[in-house]
C-alpha cells in the first residue's frame, strides 16, 4: 500500500507533479469563488509549482454565493471487524447525512449521493471540514466508530474540476493513531459554484479492476502518525481596552478588583482542525504574561491547513468578545518531502515557528460602549483596519505522541531563552503628504494620521504623543465637484518613533523576492504585448531571451543573512532561507535549460509563468512581526477611511536590492472605507486620494530620508493657538469663560503658553513667533480656474407656527457667511458670465430647490420639510469664465495674498468644537489664531519630537499638565520654493459596455475626471451604453511642487469616474478607472499618446471600458520647457475634439446585417410585444428594419438584409460597438424601446469581400466548403421552387416500402436465411449500441462481437460540440436586455434577436464597383410545420428533493403551448433514473422553437417540484448547415437496431447538400462510385470487406452515406444536457442524456422511431444445497471439557437480505456438520448488464419500491448455536455469482487463498455461475475481525441457477420440505452424538455421561461392592468368630 497512492499531505504541500500544458484555446473562464481565471485542461509537460495550495485560496471573495457540495459514497472495503453492520455518515460544515445500514458485511456497497447547499462566502466555505465516518450500527448500543477521514473543502476545491472522483479514502481511528488502516471508503466529492460544470459521478468503464492504490487518498507516510502541536505562549502586548469603565463600579460592589486597572481580561485560544485549547485568563491586563504551553493532538500529516490564534476578552456577564484573530497556513511553516528532482530533493520539515511575535488586526482600537460595526474584522473576515496587539509565540511539532495535558506552564529556562528575541531597536517612520484630493469629508477639518503598531495612534490615551498627524485642514472645493486640502507649498510631514525587534533580514529577503517578481511580471507583460501586437518572431525571441537573462541574473542574487549580534534568527528562518535558495537555484538552472531548448515562444512563456508562480509561493514571510503601516483619515475624532501598507514595502536598507519597493517613493493611495459596510451599502465615492512618500528605517539611519528630500526643505515648527471669546459689552478678550486655556494646542486639551516653549537640546529658534493663518481660510476660491461656478444660498427662516420669510442673513455662502444678494455679486475683473442664475436641483432638495434644517449654524440639511424645521436654504449657481490673460491675473493674486496675510489671521466659530471660518458672523462667540516659530537643528540626530519639555513651569503644577504638554509635539513641513505650472490634456474618445443606470436598460453617461486639485466633466450622451464623447478636456495652470523629473518618473494618477445623469435625484455611479498621463517636459516632444482601453469597475463588478489617452505638459518656467505648448485641438461648438494624430484612422467599411427575426419577447408595460422593429446603430449611423406584422404568426422579418456603408476605425481595437435596439410599434404612434443588446466587437464577423466572379471551380467539398464555405454562401435550405419539386418526389422515395413490399423481398429473405440465435437477438437492442459507444463493454458483449455501429455520445450539449459552433453558422442569437444592471437580480433577458453580421472593407473611392453581397439565397422565412421526436435516455446525478436524499423524477416536455407530462411513469426513489422514453410532437418553426425538457419530482400531497430543466432552440438546429435535424447514422440499414429513421435517404441528402453549397454533383457511375465536386469516391474504399450487418441497404445509398460522413454534418449522437433550476441559477441540478430529431413535414413522413425502452430484468432462482461442513473451528467447551460446536449455516443474497438457515448440527466434535439442506433464493437479473435488480420498500410506510442495481453477491456464514446467549459467529464467505472462485474438489485443498482479496485480486481464477449453471465443491469461510483473514471452516455446497420457467418445470422445496426433489435430499446421517442435551435425557446419559464417565461408574460400583463386602465381613465377623469359638 505504501508504494503508490496519492499522498494527500504531499499533494497539498505540493510535490513534484507532472505538469501540464494548456490545450483548448477557448475564452478564459472565471471561477466564481476566487474571481481568478480557471486554468484550462492541460497536456503533460515538466514540473508544476509546489505549494500550489497557497495561491488559489488566498484571494477568495467574502461575498456570499450559492455553492453546492455533492458527495457520493460508493462503497467500502476491508472494514475492520467481522460480520458488522456498517453505515457511513458524511458531515459538511455541520450538516450531517447518513447512508443506509448494510447488513453483515465488511465490504458494503452504498452508492448513495448527498447534496449540501450553502449560501456562504468562498473564503468561509473553504475552511469548513468534510468528514467521512464509518460506524458499526448496533441496534441497541450507540454506534461504534470504525474509522474516519477528514479534510477541508478548500482541498477538494483545489483539485482539477474542484472534485475528487472515485477516490479511495484510508480510514483511520482518530483516537488510536498507531492502529493503522481501518478500511477503505470510495467516494466522489465535488464543490460547485455558479457556472461550474458538475463532473459526472458515473463510474469510468476501465475501472473494473478498481486499482485502489493509484486512487488512494491517504495522509502522507501511509499511516497517520499521532503528533502534537506545541504552542509556547509567552506574552502579549498592546491589547486594546474592551470593557466599559462602568463595570469597574460593578466590580467594586461585587468585591472584584481593587484599584483602577486596564480594562481588558485577555485569554488566548489556539485552534486547529476543529480542536481548540485556551490559556488562562489574565484579569485587567493589557500586556499579559501567560507563559503557558498549549498543546493540540493531531493526526499527522493533517488534511487541514490553517492554524488559528485568537485573543479573546473574558466577560462575566455577556459573551466573550474576540479581540483579534491571526491565521497561519501550515504550508508556510513546514515543507513536505520531494519537491525537487529525484536526486536532489529539498528535505522536508515539520511545522515550526518562532519564537516570534504574531500581529493581530481587526476593527479600530477606540473603545465605545456601543456595539462595534466592524466586529467581523476581529474574527479574521475581511482586511483588518487597525492593529490590535501582538503575541509572542513559538510552535513545535513532535511526532509519535499525543499530549497528556493540554495546558502546562513554561519552565524558566525557556522564558530566559526567549528574552533575546525581544530585544528592541528604535525605528523611525517618516511620511510626507504631497496632495490630498477627492476628499469626501467636508464638514470638519481633516487630518491624516500615520501609525505603525500602536505608535502614532492619536486617539489612544496610552501611547506617547508624537507628530503623527498632519495639521487639521478644511477641504476646499475644486470648482467642479471634488474637494482637496490646500497645502500648496508647505506639505505636512509626520514622523513616528517606534521600537521593534530587528527582523530586517526577514523583510529584506522578502523585498528581494518581491522585486524579482515585479521585474519578471513587467517583462512578461512586455512579451505579452509583443505577442498581441504580432511582432516578428526574432523580435519576440529577443524579448524572451532578455527576460530569461534578467530572471537568471535575479535568481543568482544573494539572499540576506542574519548578522550575528544584530539579528536573532530561529529555526524557521534557517529552513525558509535554505528552501528559498534551493528554489532560486532550481529556477536559475531551469532557465538555462529553457534558453537552450525553447522552440516556441508560447511554450516558453507557459514555463516562465510557472517560475513566476513558484516565486510568488516563496515570497511569503510567516514571521513578519513588524506591524503594517496604517494611514487614517480623521475628521474631528472620527476615523473615516484607511490604507494599510505592509512594513517591508517601505523599509529602508543599505543594500539597494533589499529596499522596499515603495520606500521613499512617491505613491498614490486610494483610501478605503473600513469593513464591508461600504460594499454592502454600495458607497460609490472615494474617501480620499493621497500622494505620499513613506520611509521606515532604524532611527540612526534616518538621514537617508533627509537626503531623499532634495526638492523641498524640511522645516520644524513649534505651534500654539491663541484663544479668545466674545463677551457682550467687553468684546473679544482672553479672560472670561473660554472653556480652554488662553494658549493651547489645536484641540484645546493642554495649555501651551508661548513663553514656556524652550527649544530641545541640539535645536535653536530661527526668527520669532508669527501668525500662520490656516491655509484653507485664505484660499482664493477661483484660484487657478478658467471657469468658475459662483454660488450663493438664499436663506429663509420662520418662527414655530409662522410662514417662511427671508432670514436675518438672506444671502450666505456655503459656510453660512453673509454675502451680497445674488444679483449684486460682482464679476471680478477679467471674467464674463456664461449663463444666468439657476437653482441647483441636482442635490437632495425638494422640487423648488429648498433644503431644510432646524438651525442653520448646526447644519444637517434634508430635502423633506418637517414642522420643527426653522431654517431652509436653496443654492443658486452661475458660471463665469476667465478672459483676461494670465499675467494680469498673477499680479492681482499677489496683491490679494498680501492683503490677506496682513489680516490678523483669526478664525471664528460659534463654539470651539464647531467648524471655524475666516470672516466674523453675529453668532460667533469664540475665535483663535495659529502661531508658529521655526526651529533649526544644530546637532545631527538631536531629538526634537518627543522631548518637548517645558522648563518654564512652576514646580507645584501637577503632573497631568506636564503629561498633556507633550501633546505639543512640533509640526513638520516640507516647504517648496515655487510650484511648476503644468497643463494636462485628457482625450476622452469613447466607452463601451457601460452598466445600465435607467429602467430602459440604457444610461445617460458622462465622465468626471479628477487630477490633483482640479476636476472636469465631459458632456453627457443621451441613452447609450457605448457613448462616443470625442472630447478633449484641458486642465490649465496645474501647480505641482517638486522636481519635474520626479514627476516624469512617477506622474500623479488621473481618476475617471462615470455617472449616469438623472434629471431628478443624484446621478448614479457607473464605475471608475485610473490612468497615468504621458509626461512631456518639453512641449515640443514628438511622442504621441496612444488611445487605450481602461477597464472600468464598480465595486466587484466589471463596468465596461473607456478609450482614452492623457498628456501632461510642463508649462513655462523650467529649463527644459523651451517651446510653447502645442496648439489646442479643433473645436466643435464649445468643446474641444480629440486631435488627429490621436484619434483612430478611419476606413470605408461595409456592414451587412442579416435581420432574421425576434424570439421570446417578454411583455413590456404589461402588454405583449407584437409588432417590433429593430434599430442598428454603429459609429453614429443608424439603420432600421421593417416592422413585423404579428410575432404570433411569423416572428421573422420579411426583408432580411440591411446594409451600412460607414467610416469605421481601421484598427479592430478602436471599433465602435454595434448597438441593437428593439422598438415595439404601439397604438397612437408610441415606439417604446423593449430590448437592447450591445455587441462589443464585430471582429468575429469580419470576412473578405466577395469577388464579383462567382463562377468558381467546384473545389468546394475539399476546399472552402468543408469548413463552412466562402463567406458568401450562407445557404441552408433550397429556395422555395426546389422544395415543391421535392414534395412530389417525397412519396415516391418512401413508397416502395409501403406499396411494393415485394421489391424489398430479397433483403427480407436474406434476413430469414441467416436467422441469428434468439438469445443474441434479445441481448442486441438500442441499449447495446449505447453501451458500446460509452465504453461499458460488459453490458453489450454480443453487440461488440458482431462489430455493429456505434454512436457519438457527447458529454456536453450538442451546441458546445466543436464543429457545430452553437449552430450559429446561419444566424446567431443575441440576448436582449432591459432594466438596470443590479448584481443580485435574476437575469434580465427579455427576448432574443436572431441575425448575423458581415463586416468587410469597401474601396475608398465611392465610384469604384461595390463587391457583391455576402448574404445571398437565404432560406424562406415563412413558418414550417415539423414533427419533433424527443428521445430521453437517462438522468445523471439529479438534485434530490426528498428528505431521503432521493427523488421521484418524471419528464415533462413543453413546446410552444403543447405540454406532455409523463407523470404516471415516474421513477421512484432514484437520482440516476433510466427513462428510455420517446415523445413525438408537431410544431411550427420558428413560432414555437424552444423545446423545454423539464424534470419534476413526483409528490403525492404537495405540488410537484421542478428538479431542473433544459431548453433547446430547435430553429437553430433546423437552419444550421451542419444538418442538425436528424443525426446521420453510421450505416444505411433497412431493418434491425440500426434501421434508417430519416425522412429522406442519403442520396437525396447528398444532392441537397451539393445544391445548397454550389458544389457540382453528385454524379453516380453505376452504384459503386460517385463524383462530388472534383473528387471521386468509390464504395470499395469505404467498405473493403463485406458489410457485417445482414440488413444493409442498396449500394448507392450506402456510398452516398459514406460521402456525407466526410462532410461537416451532425452524426447520430446522444447529447448530455445539464439541468438548471431558477431557484439556484447557475448551479447545475443534474444532467440528462437525450437527443432530438426534427422532420419537416414537407419532406415526407419520417422513418420508424428507435425503441429505447429500458432493459427488463429476468427472474432467476438460485438453489444452494448445503451438504456438509468440514474443519469448522470448535468454539464451545462442553461440561465435560471437550471442544465442540453446534454448527448451522446461514445464507442470503446481499441486498435482498432475506436470510435462510439450516437446522443445527449439535455437538460437532471434529468441526464436521452434515445438513443436506436446500436454500432457495429467487432474484431478478439483467443479463446484458450483469447486475441484479432489487426492488424493495425502504420503510413500511414507503409508497414505492426502491430499485437498486447490485452485484449478485451470495453470502454464506457458519454460526455456532447457543441456547441461552447470542449465537457466535464463526466464519463467512461472500461470492459474486458473476465472478466467483472455482470450488475445491477436496476438502484438503480448500484454502483462504482461493478467495479474491483487495490485494490479490488478479491471481484467482473466477467463473460465472450464469455461464456454468451449476457448481459443486468446497468453499472456505473465514473470520477477519483481527484485520487478517483466518480460515474458520469449509462448506461443501452445490449451487444451481435456474430460470423461473425451469424452476416451475423442476420444482424443489426449501430445506427438506416437499416437493423434495431435483435432487431429493435425505435427512443427514449425523453421528449419534449429535443431539440437544436437555431435549433427550437418555441420549444425554448414554452419549455424554456414560461415554465420558463409565469407568468412574464402574470403579465406583466395584468400590461400593468391596466396601459392602468389607462392611458385611466386619459386621458378621465378630458373631461368626464368637460362634465359632463357642461352637469351636
Image (cartoon, rainbow, N blue to C red):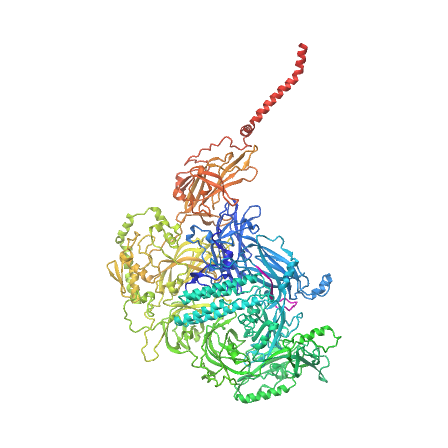
Q: Is residue 597 magenta?
A: no
Point out residue 1693 in the picture as x, y percentages from the top left corner.
46, 44
**In the displayed structure, would residue 579 be above or below residue 1080?**
above
| Residue reaching furthest to the front | 564
Q: Which residues are magenta?
A: 352-373
State the residue in front, 584 or 1750. Answer: 584
**In the displayed structure, would residue 376 be above or below residue 1438?**
below
| Residue reaching furthest to the right | 956
The residue depicted at 41 percent of the width and 36 percent of the height is 1862
Point out residue 1179 in the picture as x, y percentages from the top left corner.
41, 77
Point out residue 363 in the picture as x, y percentages from the top left corner.
61, 67
Q: Is residue 759 left or right of residue 1685?
A: right
Q: Specify whether residue 1316 is in view.
A: yes
**In the displayed structure, would residue 887 be above or below residue 53?**
below
Q: Quadrant of the C terminus?
A: top right
Say which quarter of the image contains residue 398. bottom right
**In the displayed structure, would residue 1796 be above or below residue 931?**
above
Amino acid at each position: 500500500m505504501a508504494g503508490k497512492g496519492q499522498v494527500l499531505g504531499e499533494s497539498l504541500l505540493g510535490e513534484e507533479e507532472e505538469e501540464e500544458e494548456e490545450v483548448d484555446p477557448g475564452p478564459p473562464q472565471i471561477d466564481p469563488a476566487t474571481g481568478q481565471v480557471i486554468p484550462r485542461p492541460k497536456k503533460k509537460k515538466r514540473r508544476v509549482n509546489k505549494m500550489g495550495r497557497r495561491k488559489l485560496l488566498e484571494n477568495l471573495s467574502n461575498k456570499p454565493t450559492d455553492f453546492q457540495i455533492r458527495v457520493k459514497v460508493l462503497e467500502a472495503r476491508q472494514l475492520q471487524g467481522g460480520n458488522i453492520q456498517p453505515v457511513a455518515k458524511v458531515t459538511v460544515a455541520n450538516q450531517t447525512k447518513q447512508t443506509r445500514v448494510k447488513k453483515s458485511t465488511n465490504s458494503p456497497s452504498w452508492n448513495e449521493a448527498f447534496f449540501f447547499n450553502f449560501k456562504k462566502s468562498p473564503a468561509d466555505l473553504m475552511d469548513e471540514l468534510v468528514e467521512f465516518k464509518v460506524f458499526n450500527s448496533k441496534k441497541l448500543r450507540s454506534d461504534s466508530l470504525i474509522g474516519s477521514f477528514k479534510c477541508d473543502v478548500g482541498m477538494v476545491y483545489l483539485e482539477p474540476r474542484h472534485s475528487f472522483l472515485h477516490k479511495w479514502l484510508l480510514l483511520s481511528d482518530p483516537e488510536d493513531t498507531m492502529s493503522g488502516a481501518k478500511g477503505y471508503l470510495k467516494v466522489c466529492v465535488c464543490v460547485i459554484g455558479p457556472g461550474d460544470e458538475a463532473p459526472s459521478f458515473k463510474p469510468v468503464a476501465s475501472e473494473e479492476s478498481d486499482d485502489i492504490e493509484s486512487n488512494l487518498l491517504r495522509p502522507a507516510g501511509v499511516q497517520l502518525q499521532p503528533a502534537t502541536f506545541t504552542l509556547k505562549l509567552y506574552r502579549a502586548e498592546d491589547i486594546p481596552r474592551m470593557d466599559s469603565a462602568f463595570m469597574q463600579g460593578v466590580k467594586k460592589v461585587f468585591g472584584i478588583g481593587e484599584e483602577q486597572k486596564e480594562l481588558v481580561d485577555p485569554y488566548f485560544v489556539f485552534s486547529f482542525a476543529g480542536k481548540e485549547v485556551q490559556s488562562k485568563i489574565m484579569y485587567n491586563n493589557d500586556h499579559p504574561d501567560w507563559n503557558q504551553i498549549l498543546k493540540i493532538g493531531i493526526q499527522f500529516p493533517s488534511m487541514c491547513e490553517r492554524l488559528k490564534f485568537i485573543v479573546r476578552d473574558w466577560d462575566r456577564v455577556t459573551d466573550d468578545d474576540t479581540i483579534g484573530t491571526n491565521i497561519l497556513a501550515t504550508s508556510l511553516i513546514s515543507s513536505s518531502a520531494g519537491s525537487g528532482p529525484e536526486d536532489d530533493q529539498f528535505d522536508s520539515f515539520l511545522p515550526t515557528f518562532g519564537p516570534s511575535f504574531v500581529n493581530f488586526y481587526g476593527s479600530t482600537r477606540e473603545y465605545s460602549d456601543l456595539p462595534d460595526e466592524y466586529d467581523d474584522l476581529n474574527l479574521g473576515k475581511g482586511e483588518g483596519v487597525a492593529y490590535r496587539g501582538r503575541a509572542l509565540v513559538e510552535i513545535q511539532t513532535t511526532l509519535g505522541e499525543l499530549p497528556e495535558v493540554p495546558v502546562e506552564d513554561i519552565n524558566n529556562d525557556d522564558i530566559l531563552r526567549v528574552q533575546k528575541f525581544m530585544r528592541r531597536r528604535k525605528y523611525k517612520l517618516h511620511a510626507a503628504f504631497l496632495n490630498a484630493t477627492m476628499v469626501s469629508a467636508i464638514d470638519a477639518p481633516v487630518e491624516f494620521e500615520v501609525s505603525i503598531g500602536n505608535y502614532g495612534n492619536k486617539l489612544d490615551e496610552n501611547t506617547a504623543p508624537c507628530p503623527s498627524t498632519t495639521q487639521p485642514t478644511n477641504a476646499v472645493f475644486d470648482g467642479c465637484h471634488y474637494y482637496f486640502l490646500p497645502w500648496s507649498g508647505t506639505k505636512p510631514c509626520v514622523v513616528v518613533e517606534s521600537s521593534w525587534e530587528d527582523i530586517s533580514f526577514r523583510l529584506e529577503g522578502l523585498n528581494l523576492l518581491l522585486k524579482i517578481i515585479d521585474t519578471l511580471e513587467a517583462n512578461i507583460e512586455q512579451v505579452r504585448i509583443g505577442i498581441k501586437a504580432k511582432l516578428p518572431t526574432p523580435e519576440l525571441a529577443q524579448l524572451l531571451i532578455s527576460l530569461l537573462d534578467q530572471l537568471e541574473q535575479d535568481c543568482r542574487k544573494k539572499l540576506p543573512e542574519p548578522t550575528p549580534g544584530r539579528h536573532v534568527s530561529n529555526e524557521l528562518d534557517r529552513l525558509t532561507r535554505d528552501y528559498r535558495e534551493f528554489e532560486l537555484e532550481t529556477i536559475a538552472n531551469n532557465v538555462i535549460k529553457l534558453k537552450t531548448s525553447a522552440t516556441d515562444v508560447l511554450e516558453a512563456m507557459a514555463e516562465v509563468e510557472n517560475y513566476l508562480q513558484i516565486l510568488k509561493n516563496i515570497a511569503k514571510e510567516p514571521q513578519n512581526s513588524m506591524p503594517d503601516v496604517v494611514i487614517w483619515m480623521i475628521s474631528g475624532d472620527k476615523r473615516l477611511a484607511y490604507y494599510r501598507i505592509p512594513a517591508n514595502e517601505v523599509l529602508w536598507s543599505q543594500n539597494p536590492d533589499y529596499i522596499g519597493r515603495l520606500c521613499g517613493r512617491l505613491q498614490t493611495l486610494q483610501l478605503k472605507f473600513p469593513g464591508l459596510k461600504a460594499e454592502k451599502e454600495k458607497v460609490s465615492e472615494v474617501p480620499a486620494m493621497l500622494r505620499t512618500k513613506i520611509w521606515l528605517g532604524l532611527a540612526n539611519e534616518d538621514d537617508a530620508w533627509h537626503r531623499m528630500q532634495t526638492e523641498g526643505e524640511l522645516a520644524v515648527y513649534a505651534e500654539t493657538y491663541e484663544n479668545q471669546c466674545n463677551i457682550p459689552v467687553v468684546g473679544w478678550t482672553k479672560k472670561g469663560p473660554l472653556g480652554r486655556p488662553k494658549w493651547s494646542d489645536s484641540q484645546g486639551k493642554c495649555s501651551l503658553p508661548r513663553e514656556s516653549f524652550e527649544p530641545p537640546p541640539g535645536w535653536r529658534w530661527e526668527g520669532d513667533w508669527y501668525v500662520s493663518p490656516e491655509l484653507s481660510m485664505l484660499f482664493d476660491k477661483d484660484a487657478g480656474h478658467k471657469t468658475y461656478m459662483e454660488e450663493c444660498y438664499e436663506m429663509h427662516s420662520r418662527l414655530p407656527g409662522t410662514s417662511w420669510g427671508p432670514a436675518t442673513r438672506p444671502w450666505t455662502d456655503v459656510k453660512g457667511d453673509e454675502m451680497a444678494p445674488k444679483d449684486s455679486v460682482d464679476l471680478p475683473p477679467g471674467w464674463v458670465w456664461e449663463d444666468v442664475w439657476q437653482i441647483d436641483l441636482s442635490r437632495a432638495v425638494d422640487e423648488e430647490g429648498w433644503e431644510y434644517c432646524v438651525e442653520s449654524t448646526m447644519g444637517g440639511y434634508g430635502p423633506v420639510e418637517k414642522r420643527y424645521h426653522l431654517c431652509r436654504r436653496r443654492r443658486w449657481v452661475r458660471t463665469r469664465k476667465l478672459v483676461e490673460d494670465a499675467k494680469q491675473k498673477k499680479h492681482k493674486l499677489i496683491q490679494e495674498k498680501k492683503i490677506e496675510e496682513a489680516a490678523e489671521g483669526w478664525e471664528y466659530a460659534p463654539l470651539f468644537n464647531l467648524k471655524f471660518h475666516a470672516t466674523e458672523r453675529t453668532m460667533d462667540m469664540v475665535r483663535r489664531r495659529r502661531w508658529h516659530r521655526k526651529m533649526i537643528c544644530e546637532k545631527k540626530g538631536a531629538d526634537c519630537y518627543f522631548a518637548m519639555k517645558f522648563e518654564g513651569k512652576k514646580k507645584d503644577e501637577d503632573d497631568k499638565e506636564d503629561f498633556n504638554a507633550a501633546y505639543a509635539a512640533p509640526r513638520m513641513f516640507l516647504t517648496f520654493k515655487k510650484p511648476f505650472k503644468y497643463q494636462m490634456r485628457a482625450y476622452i474618445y469613447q466607452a463601451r459596455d457601460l452598466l445600465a443606470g435607467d429602467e430602459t436598460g440604457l444610461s445617460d453617461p458622462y465622465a468626471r475626471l479628477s487630477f490633483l486639485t482640479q476636476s472636469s466633466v465631459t458632456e453627457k450622451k443621451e441613452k447609450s451604453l457605448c457613448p462616443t464623447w470625442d472630447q478633449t478636456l484641458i486642465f490649465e495652470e496645474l501647480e505641482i511642487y517638486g522636481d519635474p523629473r520626479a514627476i516624469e518618473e512617477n506622474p500623479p494618477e488621473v481618476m475617471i469616474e462615470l455617472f449616469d445623469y438623472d434629471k431628478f435625484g443624484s446621478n448614479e455611479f457607473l464605475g471608475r478607472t485610473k490612468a497615468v498621463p504621458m509626461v512631456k517636459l518639453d512641449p515640443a516632444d514628438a511622442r504621441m499618446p496612444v488611445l487605450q482601453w481602461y477597464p472600468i469597475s464598480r465595486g466587484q463588478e466589471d463596468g465596461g471600458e473607456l478609450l482614452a489617452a492623457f498628456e501632461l505638459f510642463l508649462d513655462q518656467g523650467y529649463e527644459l520647457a523651451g517651446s510653447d505648448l502645442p496648439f489646442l485641438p479643433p473645436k466643435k461648438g464649445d468643446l474641444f475634439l480629440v486631435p488627429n494624430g490621436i484619434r483612430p484612422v478611419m476606413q470605408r467599411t461595409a456592414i451587412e446585417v442579416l435581420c432574421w427575426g425576434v424570439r421570446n419577447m417578454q411583455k413590456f408595460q404589461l402588454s405583449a410585444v407584437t409588432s417590433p422593429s429593430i434599430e442598428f446603430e454603429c459609429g453614429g449611423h443608424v439603420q432600421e428594419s421593417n416592422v413585423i406584422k404579428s410575432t404570433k404568426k411569423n416572428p421573422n422579418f420579411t426583408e432580411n438584409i440591411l446594409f451600412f456603408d460607414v467610416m469605421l476605425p481601421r484598427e479592430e481595437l478602436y471599433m465602435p460597438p454595434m448597438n441593437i435596439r428593439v422598438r415595439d410599434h404601439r397604438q397612437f404612434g408610441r415606439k417604446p424601446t423593449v430590448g437592447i443588446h450591445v455587441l462589443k466587437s464585430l471582429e468575429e464577423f469580419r470576412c473578405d469581400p466577395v469577388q464579383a466572379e462567382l463562377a468558381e471551380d467546384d473545389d468546394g467539398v475539399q476546399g472552402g466548403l468543408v469548413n463552412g464555405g466562402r463567406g458568401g454562401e450562407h445557404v441552408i435550405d433550397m429556395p422555395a421552387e426546389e422544395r415543391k419539386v421535392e414534395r412530389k418526389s417525397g412519396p415516391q422515395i418512401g413508397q416502395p416500402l409501403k406499396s411494393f413490399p415485394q421489391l424489398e423481398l430479397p433483403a427480407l429473405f436474406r434476413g430469414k436465411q441467416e436467422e441469428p440465435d434468439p438469445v443474441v437477438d434479445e441481448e442486441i437492442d438500442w441499449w447495446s449500441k449505447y453501451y458500446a459507444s460509452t465504453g461499458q463493454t460488459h453490458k453489450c458483449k454480443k453487440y461488440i462481437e458482431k462489430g455493429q455501429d456505434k454512436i457519438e455520445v457527447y458529454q456536453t450539449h450538442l451546441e458546445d460540440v466543436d464543429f457545430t459552433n452553437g449552430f450559429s453558422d446561419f444566424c446567431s442569437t443575441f440576448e436582449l436586455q432591459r432594466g438596470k444592471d443590479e448584481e443580485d437580480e435574476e437575469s434580465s433577458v427579455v427576448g432574443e434577436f436572431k441575425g448575423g453580421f458581415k463586416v468587410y472593407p469597401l474601396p475608398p473611392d465611392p465610384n469604384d464597383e461595390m463587391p457583391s453581397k455576402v448574404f445571398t439565397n437565404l432560406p424562406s422565412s415563412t413558418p414550417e410545420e415539423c414533427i419533433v421526436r424527443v428521445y430521453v435516455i437517462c438522468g445523471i446525478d439529479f438534485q434530490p428533493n426528498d428528505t431521503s436524499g432521493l427523488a421521484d423524477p418524471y419528464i415533462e416536455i413543453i413546446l410552444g403551448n403543447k405540454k406532455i407530462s409523463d407523470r404516471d411513469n415516474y421513477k421512484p426513489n432514484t437520482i440516476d433514473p433510466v427513462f428510455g422514453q420517446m415523445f413525438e410532437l408537431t410544431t411550427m418553426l420558428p413560432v414555437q422553437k424552444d423545446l423545454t425538457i423539464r424534470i419534476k419530482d413526483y409528490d403525492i400531497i404537495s405540488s410537484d417540484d421542478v428538479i431542473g430543466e433544459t431548453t433547446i432552440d430547435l430553429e437553430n438546429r433546423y437552419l444550421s448547415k451542419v444538418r442538425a435535424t436528424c443525426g446521420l447514422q453510421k450505416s444505411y440499414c433497412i431493418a434491425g437496431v440500426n434501421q434508417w429513421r430519416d425522412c429522406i435517404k442519403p442520396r437525396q441528402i447528398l444532392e441537397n447538400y451539393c445544391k445548397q453549397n454550389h458544389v457540382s454533383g453528385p454524379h453516380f457511375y453505376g452504384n459503386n462510385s460517385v463524383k462530388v465536386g472534383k473528387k471521386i469516391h468509390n464504395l470499395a474504399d469505404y467498405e473493403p470487406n463485406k458489410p457485417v450487418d445482414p440488413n444493409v441497404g442498396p449500394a448507392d445509398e450506402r456510398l452516398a452515406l459514406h460521402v456525407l460522413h466526410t462532410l461537416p454534418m451532425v452524426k447520430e449522437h446522444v447529447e448530455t444536457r445539464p439541468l438548471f433550476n431558477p431557484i439556484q441559477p447557475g448551479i447545475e441540478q443534474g444532467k440528462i442524456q437525450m437527443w432530438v430529431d426534427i422532420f419537416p413535414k414537407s419532406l415526407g413522413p419520417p422513418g420508424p422511431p428507435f425503441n429505447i425502452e429500458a432493459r427488463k430484468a429476468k427472474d432467476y432462482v438460485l438453489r444452494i444445497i448445503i451438504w456438509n461442513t468440514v474443519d469448522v473451528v470448535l468454539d464451545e467447551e462442553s461440561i465435560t471439557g471437550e471442544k465442540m460446536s453446534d454448527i448451522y449455516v446461514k445464507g442470503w443474497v446481499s441486498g435482498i437480505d432475506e436470510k435462510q438457515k439450516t437446522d443445527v448440527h449439535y455437538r460437532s466434535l471434529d468441526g464436521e456438520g452434515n445438513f443436506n439442506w436446500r436454500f432457495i433464493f429467487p432474484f431478478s437479473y439483467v443479463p446484458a448488464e450483469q447486475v441484479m435488480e432489487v426492488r424493495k420498500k425502504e420503510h413500511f410506510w414507503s409508497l414505492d419500491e426502491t430499485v437498486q442495481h447490485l452485484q449478485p453477491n451470495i453470502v454464506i456464514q457458519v454460526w455456532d448455536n447457543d441456547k441461552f446467549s447470542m449465537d457466535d459467529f464463526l466464519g463467512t464467505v461472500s461470492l459474486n455469482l458473476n465472478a466467483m472462485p472455482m470450488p475445491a474438489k477436496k476438502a484438503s485443498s480448500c484454502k483462504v487463498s482461493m478467495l479474491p482479496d483487495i490485494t490479490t485480486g488478479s491471481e484467482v481464477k473466477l467463473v460465472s455461475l450464469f455461464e456454468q449453471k451449476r457448481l459443486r465443491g468446497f468453499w472456505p469461510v473465514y473470520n477477519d475481525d483481527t484485520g487478517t483473514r483466518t480460515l474458520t471452516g469449509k462448506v461443501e455446497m452445490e449451487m444451481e441457477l435456474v430460470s423461473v420457467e425451469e424452476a416451475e418445470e423442476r420444482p424443489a422445496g426449501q430445506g427438506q420440505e416437499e416437493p423434495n426433489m431435483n435432487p431429493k435430499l435425505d435427512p443427514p446421517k449425523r453421528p449419534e452424538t449429535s443431539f440437544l442435551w436437555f431435549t433427550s435425557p437418555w441420549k444425554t446419559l448414554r452419549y455424554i455421561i456414560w461415554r465420558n464417565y463409565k469407568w468412574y461408574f464402574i470403579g465406583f460400583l466395584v468400590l461400593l461392592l468391596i466396601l459392602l463386602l468389607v462392611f458385611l465381613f466386619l459386621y458378621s465377623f465378630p458373631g461368626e468368630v464368637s460362634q465359632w469359638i463357642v461352637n469351636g
